[in-house]
Amino acid sequence: MDINGIKKLNIPASPGCYQFLDKAGKIIYIGKAANLKNRVLSYWQKSADLTPAKEAMLLEVKKIKWVETESEIEALLLEANLIKKHQPKFNVVLRDDKRFTYIKISTEEDWPRVFMTRKLEKSGRYFGPFTSVQAVGETLRIIRKIWPFRSCRRLPKKVCLYFRIGKCPGVCEAKISKNEYKKIIRQISLFLEGRKKEVVKQMGGEIKRNKDNTFLKYQLLSLNKILAHANILSLGDKYAADVIELAKILSLPKVPERIEGYDISNIFGREAVGSMAVFSGGEPEKNEYRKFKIKINPGLANDVGMLKEVLERRFKHTSPPTPLLNRRGENWPLPDLIIIDGGKAQLNMALRILKKFKLDISAIAVSKGEGRRSAQAPDKIFFAGEGKPLELPLASPALHIIKRVRDEAHRFAIAYHRKLRKKAFF
């Protein structure tokens, strides 16, 4: 198929799932979209940055089908259920891939929890897998607006903030009966299975039997309204677009798939730590974050010296291994771009380390400009070969992804630093 043939299909500009079929009529790929027309067309655009596997897939596509949904959340759930059913060969192999996320309902517990997880265990019910952690997190927040549920690992003795703001029915103090809570869990399960119509029918039947149930009426009225305004997939598209814009602005050799952010945290050299945050496709991959306890004498090294240690230790884990591979033999995937929290000195140190390990990886450093305490303070971006830093407008998509990586590395470093301080105190 070519782009002219795709345009003749009159694909709707609505949320849903699309299916690519081969000449035998077999489904070879399933995807989701906030806008089906734009997403499908994007594969055949000249500017499309496709992997070799995706390019091979397009050569086999002979037919396209789609299913419209009423909301982006329903498209997300439908995609997961269809992939599980059809197992298309060009969808990422799901088994053994730690990046995939699931929604679990702990049916083995008296008061089941609903939460996000990467681990598959024998107990409980699992929905997914999903590729976007951000979309799953947002989905759970939206579901909770309709059906309050328990998420705490251990039941507290008293109701918490979630009960007070209507996000939990207060199971710890038995503010709801087990039968009523089971109804909530059943409705959530049906919804996650993609059976929204059945959920609406059940809720309508409950209202007819109990016309005084004001809360159930509110739930039913809220269901479609809340789902219709949930832009979870378009948010993921935005993050992916931010990365593409970043590559253009910085003239990177390719769109960075894996980005690593680094930061150092200490107080006068005490309990000094370093952090590595990892983003893939514009979204955080928290299971790949790494933390470093600074080993050199902090009193003899400034932040640049500490960064040197962190980067040297990180790139001993390169894949394929270098002669400096650590004794445990662990290899970490190489990034396409590293973002350092700092200025020109930090960037120059990073470039020296990359040269030492003979790695062809792009690197930039980002630091606050004048007015550090102001949210409007311009960030200065330093990169190789340029004497003056680049200042991007606050609305720049490229700046958004740079700041997200920098801020996440900073948050992770601060959290580890506080943990060590607390441990040292006790």
Image: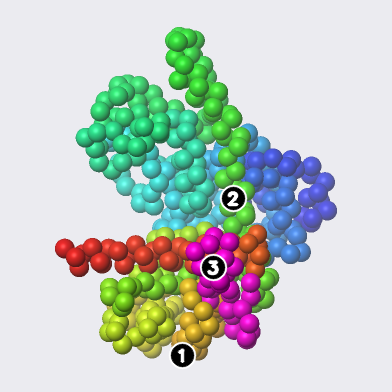
Secondary structure of the residue carrying tag 1 is: helix
Q: Is residue 385 left or right of residue 170?
A: right
**Residue 414 colored magenta?**
no
Identify the residue position indicated by label 3 in the image.
371
Question: Is residue 232 at all visible to an observer of this figure?
Answer: yes
Residue 207 % position (x, y): 48, 13
The residue that appears at 30% across and 44% down in the rendered structure is 122
> Is the residue marked by circle 3 packed among few (<14), some (14-19), or many (20+) residues within 10 Å?
few
Question: Residue, x 29% and y 33% (percent of image)?
Answer: 159
Up/down of 172 relative to 47, above or below: above
Between label 3 and label 2, give the one nearer the viewer.
3
The circle drawn on residue 235 is 2
Q: Which residues are magenta?
A: 365-391
Q: Considering only vertical position in the picture, is 241 above or below 216? A: below
Left or right relative to 181: residue 10: right
Residue situated in front as seen by the camera: 117 or 159: 159
Would you call the spot at circle 2 few (<14 residues within 10 Å), some (14-19), or many (20 or more)? some
Q: Earlier in the sequence, mark 1 or mark 2?
A: 2
Q: What label sits on residue 356 in the rendered view?
A: 1
Whether residue 368 is in magenta: the answer is yes
Q: Is residue 293 visible?
A: no
Residue type beneath disc 3: Gly
Nearest the eye: 272 or 52 = 272
Residue farthest left in this picture: 426
In space, the residues marked 3 and 1 are separated at their CA atoms by: 36 Å
Amino acid under label 2? Leu
Give the number of callouts. 3
Mark 3 vs mark 1: in front: 3
Helix, strand or loop at label 2? It is helix
